[in-house]
Image: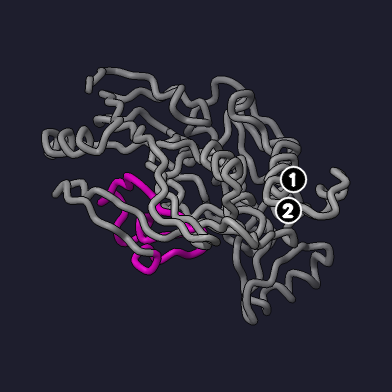
Amino acid sequence: MTIENNVSLKPFNTFGIDAKATSYCNISTVEQLKNILASQHTNPLFILGGGSNMLLTKDIEALVLHINLKGLTIVNETDNKVTVKAMAGENWHEFVLWCLEQNYGGIENLSLIPGNVGTAPIQNIGAYGVELKDVFVSCEAIHIKSQQLKTFTKKDCNFDYRESVFKQDLKSQYIITSVNFELTKTNHRLHMDYGAIKDQLNVFNIAEPTIRHISKAVIAIRQSKLPDPKDIGNSGSFFKNPIISKDEFETLNDNFPDIPSYQISDKEVKIPAGWLIEKAGFKGKRFNDYGVHKEQALVLVNYGNAKGKDIFELAKLLQKTIKRIFNIEIETEVNII
């Protein structure tokens, strides 16, 4: 375990922002993590996972702990279900593909989401009608100050839309080291009603889809809309889809009859933030080395050497404009550092 000084974080964040870390340490075991937390408890720390859900607007004047814990384990298994323990440093999409190879169902709709397993519960990642909480059993996390390992149940995590206790009451207090998932082995429940999954399956001429077909469809849809961070720096969806009351929606619908929506309860409706941004005229707009993606307005991009603070200013401009036009506040899904 080596601590390096003055390290560029450009390779470790999907936006490709060239921010510097005062010091950096790669963590590959839980014991290493405990030891460095104990020895560095008086120094400022910054916890880095897959680097896919953050925008660096400045250098990190702290010791960056890069969580690269690896391993997949079968914890429990019956004829119909299996509980898999995945370590925090496992790449999320590679984990999904591994599950598909084993014919384990439940997370195929979450294919191609960037990032690592350990950060997935923090954000309660979700896509195409499925959220992490739907398959979540528990996670283990180390308390940063005491170095004690604690198990969090689904109830403990207080999951909500792109929210969890780790973003709220326990923010910056714990580091997730592993996550347990309950997945199906037989009688998989297929989620095909959200988005364009059925249309994509028709393109593939698939009449009786499997979980692998669902994953293939989701990957095709995402690749058609979302830029690969290896080609264009981005962090996927930059904003949350806003949830408004049905009364607010009816007022909006009078003024914007083409506004899409998803009813989530008797009283609330979810509006696609990408549609709002596109309607406001920002889709595909470029400002020097950064801008709004031409295929998906929900994605802000770094075309080369943009600074994080420039992208942040663009995000604030979008928020201000959406508020002015639609009287809707859109929140960032990406963490602004």
Q: Is residue 314 visible?
A: no
Q: Residue at x 60, y 41 (%)?
A: 101
Q: Residue at x 44, y 50 (%)?
A: 84
The colour scheme of the drawn protein is: one colour
Q: Residue at x 70, y 72 (%)?
A: 249
Task: Quickly name the residue at label 1.
Answer: 217
**x, y (%) of residue 185?**
57, 56
Amino acid at pointer 2:
Trp
Q: Is residue 137 visible?
A: yes
Label 1 crowd bin: few (<14), some (14–19), many (20+), radius 10 Å: many
**x, y (%) of residue 217?**
74, 45
Front-most of 76 and 39? Answer: 76
Which quadrant of the figure has residue 294? top right
As for residue 49 lying within the magenta part, the answer is no
**x, y (%) of residue 179?**
39, 50
Which quadrant of the figure has residue 43? top left
Question: Magenta stretch?
Answer: 154-182
Q: Is residue 130 above or below residue 281?
A: below
Indicate the quadrant containing the C terminus: top left, top right, bottom left or bottom right: top left
Indicate the quadrant containing the N terminus: top left, top right, bottom left or bottom right: top left
Relative to 97, 162 lies left or right: left
Amino acid at pointer 1:
Ala
Q: Is residue 208 above or below residue 178?
A: below
Front-most of 313 and 164? Answer: 164
Q: CA distance from mark 2 to mark 1?
A: 22 Å
As for residue 158 lying within the magenta part, the answer is yes
Relative to 163, 40 lies left or right: left
Task: Quickly name the residue at label 2.
Answer: 275
Name the N-terminal-most of marks 2 and 1.
1
Q: Is residue 58 above or below residue 246?
A: above
